[in-house]
């Protein structure tokens, strides 16, 4: 997954691992993330090849990096023997790393490759989870919490248990985890805090996946809302990511909407680009007829300064929302024209074709559209897509504004001519029919003008002859 969040490693002595994780977090695109991962894989492979004298600490760091790459969803086809060799270490911390890697690989294999064959593991996983979570959960150290984390991930590969007792037991476990998440950490160790938060977010993911209880979904929304202003960037990202999933449920959609102002504030003030992108995704997910105007306006404002890597996706989202929730097509026309103005390079043919289609098929908006594109074309630096849209609409409906002194057919003709002189051959060919229509109307208006002047002069002459 692009820019999947992991907390920076602190206090465990593995500086190289911390630097690598932070490098991945700071990548602004999938391509940059893959490039950094490939660079690291090449470096690790070179260290493992040959008779390199690596001590236990170095092997531990490299194996941890491979584990992190694996958790991001990438394939790792080497390093297994180095991980196994750590089992012979005299140091527990080095053995522990190997156990973590082996357990992660085993659980992934069981849940992903043979889910049907291992369905019977679900009751056992619930039982083990219950033993870990209930009664002594607040006294747990890192190891049991990581086991809890893996059990929660395993259960996400299966539907809710059919057995009512197992289902009730699982709900009890999830409630206990949510309760614990509200309390301050019992340990000052930063690893304990990270493990606790990791368990909390995996519990939220399981609540969403199994859709067990509406009450749990609403509660999850409220607790996630408290993370939106957390000082840790990673937690803000994870909260927004989880809320995006909760927004798709009919039971929790309204609960998410209550945090709209906080989400919008994240869009305005957040420094991390990936968090801002998640805020955009969440605003899109909670948008409906009651808040569409505000959300679209905020997204348009952000579009002006958004990273180029997400502009195309944002433009598509805004266009979809504008058409879906438009109660007045003049608003829809305004939104699409602003998209072209703010991010013309990222407006696809489907989007500007669609606005033309809607204007053609809705007579009530044709005059407004003609007036709007005429005004937009007066901008000396208007985008070529604006020339395409504006030229076509003026060709079809420019007559509706031709009676105004500032937008006569002659002025429309001169304006479009000045734009076409700087446009591509493709645009000129596309607008040939529209250009001909406008030129014809301009010529007709010039022909009518002398006749009107003759009538005026004749009327004046007659009036003068009647003066005694």
Image (tube, rainbow, N blue to C red):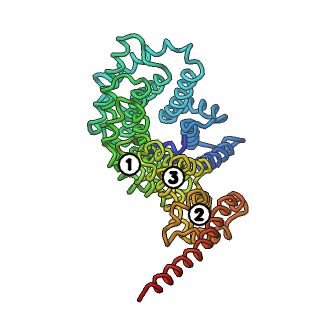
**For the residue labelled by badge 1, is the local secondary structure a helix, a strand or a loop?**
loop
Contact between marks 3 and 2 (CB within 8 A): the answer is: no
Q: Which residue is under mark 1?
A: 232
Taking 295 as reference, is 116 above or below it?
above
State left or right for residue 381 relative to residue 289. right
Residue 239 picture location, percent across and down: 39, 41
Which residue is rendered at x = 51% and y = 35% of the image?
94
> Residue 22: which disc?
none
Query: How many neighbours does mark 1 have within 10 angstroms: few (below 14), some (14-19), or many (20 or more)?
Result: few
Residue 409 visible in the snapshot = yes
Q: Nearer the viewer, residue 319 or 83?
A: 319
Residue 191 picture location, percent across and down: 39, 40
> Which callout, 1 or 2, points at the residue further toward the start of the chain?
1
> Residue 26: which disc?
3
State left or right for residue 168 relative to residue 321. left
Q: Nearer the viewer, residue 285 or 420?
A: 420
> Which callout, 3 or 2, points at the residue further toward the start of the chain?
3
> Which callout, 3 or 1, points at the residue further toward the start of the chain?
3
Which residue is rendered at x = 65% and y = 67% of the image?
439
Query: Which quarter of the rendering shows the C terminus?
Result: bottom left
Q: Rounded to the nearest whole Å, what is the CA distance between mark 1 and mark 2?
A: 40 Å
Which residue is rendered at x = 39% and y = 27% of the image?
207
**For the residue labelled by badge 3, is the local secondary structure a helix, a strand or a loop?**
loop
Q: Which residue is under mark 2?
A: 383
Residue 71 picture location, percent across and down: 54, 36
Task: Classify residue 423 by image quadrant.
Answer: bottom right
Query: How many neighbours does mark 2 have within 10 angstroms: few (below 14), some (14-19), or many (20 or more)?
Result: some
């Amino acid at each position: 997954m692009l820019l999947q969040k992991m907390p920076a490693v602190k206090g465990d002595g593995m500086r190289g691992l911390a630097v690598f994780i932070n490098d991945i977090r700071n990548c602004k695109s999938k391509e940059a993330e893959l490039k950094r991962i490939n660079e690291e894989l090449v470096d690790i492979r070179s260290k493992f090849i040959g008779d390199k004298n690596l001590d236990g600490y170095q092997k531990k760091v490299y194996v941890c990096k491979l584990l992190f790459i694996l958790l991001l969803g990438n394939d790792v086809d080497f390093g297994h023997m180095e991980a196994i060799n750590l089992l012979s270490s005299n140091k527990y911390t080095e053995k522990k790393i190997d156990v973590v890697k082996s357990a992660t690989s085993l659980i992934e294999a069981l849940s992903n490759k043979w889910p049907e064959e291992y369905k019977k593991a679900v009751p056992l996983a619930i039982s083990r989870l219950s033993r870990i979570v209930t009664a002594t959960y607040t006294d747990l150290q890192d190891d049991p919490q990581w086991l809890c984390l893996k059990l929660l991930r395993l259960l996400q590969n299966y539907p809710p248990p059919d057995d009512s007792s197992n289902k009730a037991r699982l709900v009890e476990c999830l409630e206990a985890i949510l309760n614990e998440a509200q309390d301050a950490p019992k340990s000052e160790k930063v690893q304990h805090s990270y493990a606790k938060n990791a368990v909390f977010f995996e519990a939220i993911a399981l609540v969403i996946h199994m859709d067990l209880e509406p009450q749990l979904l609403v509660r999850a929304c409220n607790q996630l809302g408290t993370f939106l202003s957390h000082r840790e960037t990673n937690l803000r990202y994870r909260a927004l990511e989880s809320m995006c999933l909760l927004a798709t449920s009919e039971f929790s959609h309204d609960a998410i909407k209550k945090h709209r102002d906080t989400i919008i504030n994240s869009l305005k003030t957040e420094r991390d680009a990936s968090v801002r992108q998640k805020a955009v995704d969440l605003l899109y997910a909670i948008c409906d007829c009651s808040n569409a105007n505000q959300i679209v306006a905020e997204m348009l404002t952000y579009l002006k300064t958004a990273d180029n890597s997400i502009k195309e996706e944002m433009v598509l989202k805004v266009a979809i929302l504008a058409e879906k929730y438009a109660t007045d097509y003049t608003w829809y026309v305004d939104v699409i024209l602003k998209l072209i103005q703010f991010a013309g390079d990222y407006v696809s043919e489907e989007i500007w074709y669609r606005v033309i289609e809607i204007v053609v098929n809705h007579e009530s908006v044709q005059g407004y559209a003609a007036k709007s594109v005429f005004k937009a074309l007066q901008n000396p630096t208007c985008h070529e897509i604006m020339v395409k849209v504006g030229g076509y609409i003026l060709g079809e409906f420019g007559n509706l504004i031709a009676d105004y002194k500032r937008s006569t057919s002659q002025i429309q003709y001169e304006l479009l001519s000045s734009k076409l002189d700087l446009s591509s051959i493709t645009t000129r060919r596309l607008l040939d029919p529209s250009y001909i229509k406008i030129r014809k109307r301009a010529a007709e208006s010039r022909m009518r003008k002398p006749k009107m002047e003759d009538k005026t002069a004749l009327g004046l002459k007659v009036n003068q002859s009647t003066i005694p």
